[in-house]
Amino acid sequence: MIPFELVEPRSLAKAIALLDPDDTSVRPIAGGTALMLMMKANVFQPTRLISLRRIEKRFSRIQAEADGGVRIGALATLGELERAAAVKRKLPVVAETLRILSNVRVRNVATVGGNLAHGDPHMDLPPVLMALGAGVGIVGPAGKRTLAVEDLFAGYYETVLARNELIAELHIPAQGARRAAYLKCTTGSADDWPALGVAVSLDAEGQAIRSARLVVSAATEKAMRLKSAEAVLAGAEVDDGVLARAGEAAVEEAEVISDVRGSAAYKRELLRVYVARAVRKALATKTRGRRP
Amino acid sequence: MSAAPRTIRFTLNGAAVSASVAPHHNLVEMLQQQFSLFGARESCGQGLCGCCTVLVDGRAVSACLFLAVFVDGTQVVTIEHLGAPERLSDVQEAFIEAGGFQCGFCTPGFVLMTHQLLDEHPDPNDDQIRDYLVGNLCRCAAYPEIVEAVKIAARKRKADAAV
């Protein structure tokens, strides 16, 4: 890697002040697992990195809220999220997804905030968070703002964050009786980046769906909700016909792209199949929470 | 200029040490160049193969994806700390017993990941073994023997704990 400056501020405010809104070669670094790959490949050549590792400890905390929601500091590692009792108990789909995401060593280092800010459409956690209706707290020079995770991504490795804004925390709301599932399909080795990810969260009684949130990732240039497929599922009693129509609507709506992991035509076929499988999997999941 | 080397202090294999490292150097480079520790080696360079596994504050990391300056103030443990030729760790003994290697290039990483696994799950099931070892590649494909070695090591620990 080429040499660069590294600054290690002790506070979030100082870190934000050190970021440069106009210079693309200045970036924050937390765990660094994703950034290191880009720097090793010379895809990213920083002049200065602002390390977030020494900022206030509260930005790594994971807190269960009384209503069943969970608040997660952006610097919590994926491994800490995976092991958190509140996540295992209240958000089993998150714990299960972390288990099939990368490997133990990367999860020990990569952070929740970095996972989101990287804007990589192949990542497994963002589509799940979108299906769960999660939001992020963002801090910049002008103060704080909140944003739904589904509004965070602007394109391929792009987010709506300004260069001097940082994700400070993630909030996953209480899921009540909603049931969720995430499935991915890898076309290389089992632990390769996925060709497709599908996350779904359902409010359902038996096989009768009241409302659905359905998200596609990896096959598209950014993770995105598929609202036409959600509309097919809402109010429907699930059977093969409904799932076929939902799959069809998903394929119509998603702008699937070809890459080394499969052609667009192939991934559209995967999407059709995986929408049905994800819905079936969510419906087969036992509810953990009580209906409010 | 903060691109220049800086002095960091940390605990390496039980001893307090300091090192002068530039921000762009990774942990493998520092361990090899400044401490002549070659057990962690950069192989894939992408965190996929596990050959560069090192424990930082008790947690396994891919040292090839870890900036060296980030170990400032931490406890670092490498494969060299686990045992000596005359006094192997229980996991190292189990790998020999099961024949859990051929060329041995990947073995330090597998041994360290197994230590981490058994520290956190003393009686691991097959799922847990695969979860901890999925990020370690053995090009000799000694996988069945490696899984057996993990089970032998777990039994050894249980027997030792019972004594």
Image (cartoon, rainbow, N blue to C red):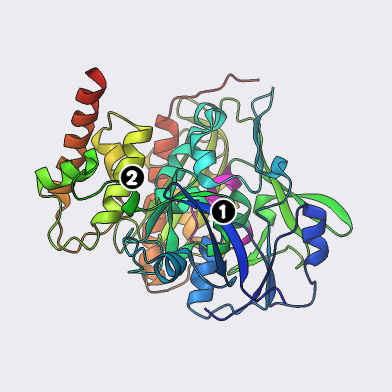
Q: Is residue A120 magenta?
A: yes
Q: Amino acid at mark 1?
A: Leu
Q: Tell me the residue at 29%/43% (across/down).
A: B114
Q: Position of residue A256 (x, y in %)?
A: 48, 67
Segment tinted magenta in the rendering? A117-131
- Please tell me the numbered disc located at residue B132: 2
Q: Residues within 10 Å of mark 1 (few under 14, many from 20)?
A: some
Q: Tell me the residue at 36%/70% (across/down).
A: A262
Residue B24 is drawn in which quadrant?
bottom right
Q: Is residue B63 left or right of residue A175?
A: left
Q: Nearer the viewer, residue B122 or B85?
A: B85
Q: Chain of mark 2?
A: B
Discs 2 and 1 carry the same chain letter: no
Q: Amino acid at mark 2?
A: Tyr
Q: Position of residue A18 (x, y in %)?
A: 79, 66
Task: Verify CB contact (< 8 Å) between mark 2 and mark 1.
Answer: no
Residue B149 is drawn in which quadrant?
top left
Q: Nearer the viewer, residue A149 or A73?
A: A73
Task: Mark yes or no: residue A41 visible.
Answer: yes
Element at badge 1?
A: loop
Q: Chain of mark 1?
A: A
Q: Residues within 10 Å of mark 2 (few under 14, many from 20)?
A: some
- Please tell me the numbered disc located at residue A16: none
Element at badge 2?
A: helix
Q: Position of residue A37 (x, y in %)?
A: 49, 70
Closer to the camera: disc 2 or disc 1?
2
Q: Position of residue A242 (x, y in %)?
A: 44, 42
Please determine whether, in this image, residue A161 is positioned above or below residue B58.
below
Q: Tell me the residue at 28%/55% (across/down).
A: B108
- Residue annotated with mark 1: A226
Q: Is residue B18 magenta?
A: no
